[in-house]
Amino acid sequence: MPITQLTAEDLILFEEDIATEFNAGMIRAPVHLYYGCEQSMLDVFENVRPQDWVLCSWRSHYQSLLKGVPPAEVKAEIMAGRSITLCFPEYRVLSSAIVTGILPIATGIALGIKRRGGSEKVWCFLGEMTAETGTAYESIKYATNHDLPVHFVVEDNGKSVCTDTRKTWNQEKLTWEDTSHPKVTYYRYETKYPHAGAGVRVQF
Amino acid sequence: MDWLAQDPRVMFLGQAVEYAGTAMTNTLKDVPREKLLEMPVDEELQMGITTGLALDGSVPVSIYPRWNFLLLATNQLVSHLDKIHTMSRGGYAPKAIIRTGIGSERPLHPGHQHVGDYTEAFRLMCKWVEVIRLDEPEQIFPAYEKALLREDGRSTLIVEWGDYYSEK
């Protein structure tokens, strides 16, 4: 039973609203919008419970909404310029705008849960470029070998900012593509939004 | 360390924590074994895990025997542990104790990659983590006492002098 009853359409409409606000110059900070991964995200959140942690990168609107943060509260934080590091402690949502930053922290929270015998789980979202880094390899290896209650969700939109991930690594098939791992979910999607912003250059 | 270990929230992690290896190991010899967690040599991962443990409610004492090793965890220390409280507008307040040392130069000089003291640089980089350097023995207990008992939500980075283990 998911935490919210939000649909794919609800998620898309939320981001479109934020895009409109951004393009109108109403948000004086970067926003990183999702599009095209709604069903994959809804599938992941079928298994996320209220007591679980959700750790994200700079793109975290969908996760915050699906973890149960009221849409008005999420929007208020975005309008206040905090989209890039959304944090909702009462909902156990934590984000970092630094590549790989959240992975070792997710691992540590999971280690703490296991050491005290807790039942919570940590869900950690990362992009495909992050997933190719040493920090990702180390965090997933440590979490797997110690069987920590954490699950990593690799979201592949093919790009790191505007850089082609596969081209830079000279690697057609990425590490987690078409693999099966008990602690990793991988999905690929195509977005209609740029890395940051919503398509209109906004001069402040 | 024995006094810190009496607090049920406290655990110690790092390299040469469960195993012999550094001067700091000796300071943990009377700490109950279940409180010690040996880590892989992976400074960035260790600091992130430290922050995660603190977010979960532990007070981790994260040990980096030398400043030069701690440099490898700078991203997690400066951009995460030091910033999470601000990023979350006070909602998250991970309390960790980071313990590092200025490498000893006597009787053996271990080379220039092992004797750095970056205390002032990290004081400039950290806005929320308090950096305390222990220059005299009488500073030791008050510094660790403050680090453990503080209620302002801040973490503490405590710097020890390797040469003083035998000289002071």
Image (cartoon, rainbow, N blue to C red):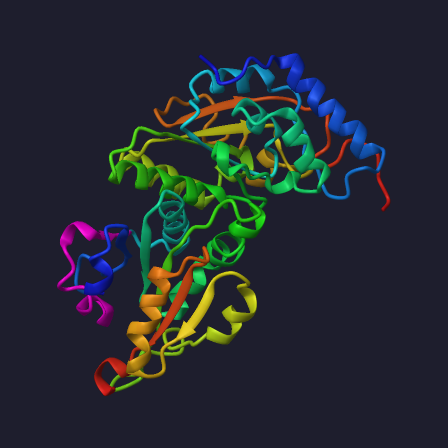
Viewer-side residue, B105 vs B135:
B135
Which residue is pictured at 25% across the width and 39% down the height? A116
Name the residue located 33 percent from the left edge and 31 percent from the top edge: A149
- Please state, as top left, top right, bottom left or bottom right, where the C terminus of chain B lies in the image: bottom left
Where, by quadrant of the figure, is residue B10 drawn? bottom left
Q: Which residue is more in the foreground, A70 or B100?
A: A70
Q: Is residue B14 above or below residue A174?
A: below
Region in magenta: B21-39
Residue nearer the viewer, B120 or B107: B120
Work out whether A73 lies above or below B47: above
Place of residue A35 in the rendered image (x, y in percent of width and height, measured from the top left): 66, 22
Residue B52 image position (x, y, % from top left): 39, 45
Q: Is residue B137 left or right of residue A127?
A: left
Query: Can residue B163 be seen in the rendering of this structure?
Result: no
Name the spot of residue B29 as percent of width and height, x first: 14, 64
Q: Quadrant of residue A75?
A: top right
Pick the quarter of the image with the N terminus of chain B. Answer: bottom left
Please state if B8 lies on the left or on the right of B78 as rendered: left
Query: Residue placed at 45% from the left, 64% from the top?
Result: B71
Query: Any magenta on residue B14?
Result: no
Q: Is residue B151 left or right of residue A148?
A: right
Locate residue A87 relative to residue B152 in the image: left or right: right
Q: Number of numbered discs present? A: 0
The answer to whether any part of residue A33 appears in the image is: yes
Q: Nearer the viewer, residue A172 or B43?
A: B43
Residue visible at 27% across and 36% down in the picture: A114
